Structure formats: C-alpha cells, structure tokens
Image (cartoon, rainbow, N blue to C red):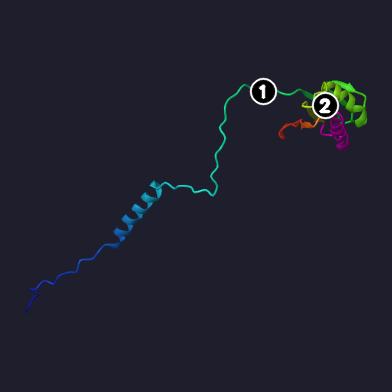
Amino acid sequence: MRFRTESRRDQPEVNLIAFIDVLLVILIFLMVSTTFTRFSALQVTLPAAHAAARQALPRLVTVSVDASGKFAIDGRLVAARDPEALAAPLKEAAQSNPDCVVEIRADAMATHQSVVHVMEAARLAGLARLVFAAQSGNVSR
C-alpha cells in the first residue's frame, strides 16, 4: 500500500471578504475626512456690518378701525367716514412729516373698504409708509 508521501502543495488563496472589508473601512474614512471646496460662478465681496449708533425711529401714527367702521387716530375718535375727511386729521397727527409711519390696526370684523379708506387717506396726506398690526393665530377668545 502506498501512501502519499509527496506532499501536495495547497495553493495559497487570498481572503477576498477581509480585503473588501478593509477597503470599505478605508473608503469610509476617506469620505469622512475629505474637505470639499466650493467653487462659485461669481466672486462676491460681501459688505461689512458696523455697529453704529441706533437711528431714531420715525414717528408712528396709529389708526384704529373697529368692526362698525369707526376710525380713531392715536386713540382719539375721528368722525370722518370718507378718505378726504380722514386725510386732514391724519396729516395733523403726522405733523406734516412725510417719513411718518402709519400703523393700521383693523378689527378682524372690519370691512375691507374701511381699511382701504385709511390707505387712501394716508396717500392723500402724503404718507407713503404703511404697516398693518396683526396678532398671532394662536390667540384664543
């Protein structure tokens, strides 16, 4: 009986699974540690901000409109119903200052037309800066 005496050499094999695992770890490391540069089409120089003295706020004239269409300028009831009649007390309250801001505080149930009257009166008085006062939507009554 003849036993194999000659040793058959096993071919060395490369463990591909471990090799792939190592390559994936290296790939993840490179992806995390890489910094990307951003190329932009336009070279923009942004302005610098300097903290200067606070400018004086312009005069604020508050015009209130209730649900029935009555007007009040700075808390004083005005008997005007049309824009022409409302323009004179509005200009007086603004002290003829064209930079004055008109704040419109209209009731939620006020008609759209009454708010338009206030806007038209501000235009007739030469006041171009208008703001609208509003409450946040989560106020319960």
Tell me, for residue 63, which label it has, or none.
2
The residue wearing badge 1 is: 55
* Residue 74 visible somewhere in the drawing: no
Task: Name the spot of residue 129 as percent of width and height, x first.
Answer: 77, 31
Q: Secondary structure at mark 2?
A: strand
Q: Which residues are magenta?
A: 107-125
Left or right: where 55 falls relative to 12: right
Q: CA distance from mark 1 to mark 2?
A: 24 Å
Task: Name the spot of residue 12 as percent of width and height, x first.
Answer: 20, 66
* Residue 102 visible somewhere in the drawing: yes
Question: Which of the two discs, 1 and 2, labels the residue nearer the N terminus?
Answer: 1
Q: Residue at x 52, y 48 (%)?
A: 40
Q: Residue at x 9, y 75 (%)?
A: 4
Dot 2, crowdedness within 10 Å: few (<14), some or many (≥20)? Answer: many
State which quarter of the image contains the N terminus.
bottom left
State the residue in front, 48 or 5.
48
Magenta span main SS: helix
Q: Closer to the camera: disc 1 or disc 2? A: 1
Left or right: where 26 falls relative to 1: right
Task: Name the spot of residue 136 as percent of width and height, x first.
Answer: 71, 33
State the residue in front, 100 or 30.
100
Q: Is mark 1 in CB contact (under 8 Å) with mark 2?
A: no
State which quarter of the image contains the C terminus.
top right
- Tag 1: amino acid: Gln
- Tag 2: amino acid: Val
Q: Residue at x 83, y 23 (%)?
A: 96
Q: Secondary structure at mark 1?
A: loop
Residue 104: which quarter of the image?
Answer: top right
State the residue in front, 131 or 127.
127
- In the image, residue 46 lies in the stretch drawn in magenta: no
